[in-house]
Amino acid sequence: MRSVTLPSRRSFLAAGASCYAAAAQSRDFGVQPLTDPLTKRRIRHYRSPHHEVHHYYFVSPWSPSGRTLLFFQFHRDVAQLTARGRYPGRLCLMDLDGGSRRVLAEGLMGHYHVGVNQFWGDSDESVYFIDTAQPPARLARIHVPTGEISHPRSPVPCSRLSPSGNVLSCGRAGEWGVYTPAEDRYERLVTLERVLALSPNRTQGLGVASQLQNTRFSPTGDRVMIVHRTVDDPPRLIEIYVYDFRSGQLTYLAQNLHHPGWRPDGKAILFVRWDPRRMMQNLWKVDVETLEERCVFDRHLSAVHCSYHPGRPNLVLGDCYGGEFGNGLVLVDLESRTARHLVSIPQGAGADPVADERFPFRNFGLWMPPRKYLNEPRPVWNADGTRVLYTSEESGRINLYIADTSDL
């Protein structure tokens, strides 16, 4: 990995610098303790006049030590976000108590959904992100204590770090592989042609281009999940494959799904699936070794970004878009086959009819009515499951919130 000179129009600030420049000493930012009126759960609201977002429901904003949060902050004059737009802002850090807010990178263009695809390296001292300060966009690595930036020289974009911390998952529409920064070496492992040859559903995508995307290392690091989908909107075909590093084998797992996620033991993948016969969406899992698919929650659930509790795989967290749990967070117990509100969004809001066609925002590729709000909470657990971070726009800006889940 090589170091490069920073562009003069961007500042990379050392730890401890304020995230707010002129507003550093103002009262515009604060940490507000809340108690959910419905669930009585304790919540911490990082109240900000800026839109602020984390990355995604399976990309931890917590540093490896668990003491620091990584997020993207849009400029204060960015008032209204759209689903496909990119807006100016900066990459920031803060301590869990909201203190030591500091800038890592300025002059970036971020997306409301994922910021600049930021993720932690193998320690609290390194952060990766997509450098959009000047074209072409490329992966960058920041050494947090000094602000020094370097750019991995992978020939294809990289977006995930392996659990071991020494390999990056890299890919584009037609291929996927891994890049080892220490050796400056990229290895292509899977191609779109290989996936198409293996797909039992290839006739569903005839006449439509398709691509590989959203690769995710298993928690144990021995496998990678790869999503294959057609590029129409919504996609007529979404399917998942698993690549085994030990054997080099690529295996087809399932189709007709969305937002898949690994079980903590790395032996199964959870996803939502629409049942057109019963007109409902359920939770399913597929075993990566036996290839058995099974419905694990048979009630209708308008949840989207679902994930297992890190230490209790009978518990599944998701964000809802209308219905029984309104637009809040739901906690599903797969053993008791029950679901309950974890957090209400907005605070105190209960059940809410699903949105109708007057609302333009769709969850891409999902089989449910449009949603009312642009914001998607995308809840993400910390390492031991004692906290959940999510976003809400109920304050007038998309802000970060953390719910205490230490009682689960």
Image (cartoon, rainbow, N blue to C red):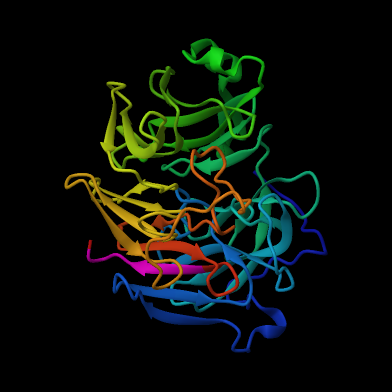
* Magenta span dominant secondary structure: strand
Residue drawn 53% across and 17% down?
195
- Quadrant containing the N terminus is top right
Q: Position of residue 119 (x, y in %)?
A: 54, 52
Look at the image and tell me whether residue 244 can be seen: no
Count how many numbered circles sit on residues in the image. 0
Q: Position of residue 79 (x, y in %)?
A: 70, 69
Residue drawn 66% across and 20% down?
208
Examine the structure image and report whether residue 402 is included in the region drawn in magenta: yes
Query: Relative to 36, is 1 above or below?
Result: above
**Considering depth in this image, is 205 or 120 the residue closer to the camera?**
205
**Considering depth in this image, is 259 or 187 the residue closer to the camera?**
259
| Residue occupying the far bottom of the picture | 26
Indicate left or right for 73 with 244 as reference: right
Q: Position of residue 163 (x, y in %)?
A: 41, 43
Range of magenta residues: 400-407
Indicate left or right for 63 with 39 as reference: right
**Considering depth in this image, is 47 or 157 the residue closer to the camera?**
47
Residue drawn 68% across and 84% down?
23
| Residue occupying the far left of the picture | 336
Q: Position of residue 317 (x, y in %)?
A: 34, 52
- Quadrant containing the C terminus is bottom left
Examine the structure image and report whether residue 251 is included in the region drawn in magenta: no
Query: Relative to 394, is 184 above or below?
Result: above
Query: Relative to 62, is 337 above or below?
Result: above
Query: Relative to 300, is 203 above or below?
Result: above
**Considering depth in this image, is 309 or 37 the residue closer to the camera?**
37
Look at the image and tell me whether residue 348 can be seen: yes
